[in-house]
Image: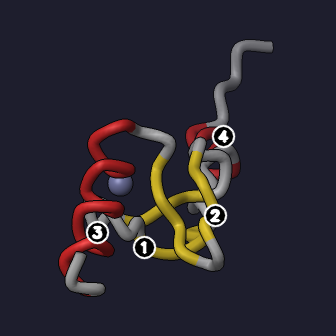
Amino acid sequence: MRQHTMSRFDEEIEEPFVLGDCEGCGLEVYEGDEHFDYQGDLIHKDSSCVMEYFGNMAISKGW
Ligand SMILES: [Zn+2]
């Protein structure tokens, strides 16, 4: 038996579930990505995203 099914890979590709947008970089946060949930805001668990997020928050609140 040497038959290969070409459709095999189609079944393995799953669309990642998008949790929301990162408040730091603005890109999508996928289920399984390491991220913070800060009072409902999603931020990638990445120092640049965290810095961006707190930077934006400081500007919007007039600190
Ligand atoms: Zn991000």
Give x and y (percent) for residue 48.
27, 42
What residue type is disc 3 on? Gly
Pinpoint residue 37: horizontal percent, then vertical percent: 63, 63
Crowding at dot 1, Cα within 10 Å, few <14 / some 14-19 / many 20+, comes out as: some
* Residue to which mark 2 is pinned: 37
- Mark 3 or 4: the one toward you: 3
SS state under label 3: loop
Q: Earlier in the sequence, mark 2 or mark 3?
A: 3
Instruction: From the viewer's side, name the closer residue of 58 and 26.
Output: 58
Label 3 C-beta lies within 8 Å of the nearest ligand 1 atom: yes
Q: Which residue is mark 3?
A: 26
Question: Which mark sits nearer the N-terminus, 1 or 4?
Answer: 4
**Residue depicted at 66% across the width and 47% down the height:** 32
Q: Quadrant of ligand 1?
A: bottom left
Q: Amino acid at mark 4?
A: Arg
Question: In the image, 20: left or right of 56?
Answer: right
Circle 4: element type = helix
Instruction: Provide the residue designation for mark 4.
Output: 8
Tell me what residue is drawn at x 40 percent, y 66 percent: 22
Answer with the quarter of the image where residue 34 lies: top right
Residue at image mark 1:
21
Badge 1 or badge 3: first in the primary sequence: 1
**Residue 21 drawn above or below residue 43:** below
> Three-letter amino acid code at disc 1?
Asp
Say the numbered circle drawn on residue 32: none
Front position among marks 2 and 1: 2
Secondary structure at badge 1 equals strand
Q: Secondary structure at mark 2?
A: strand
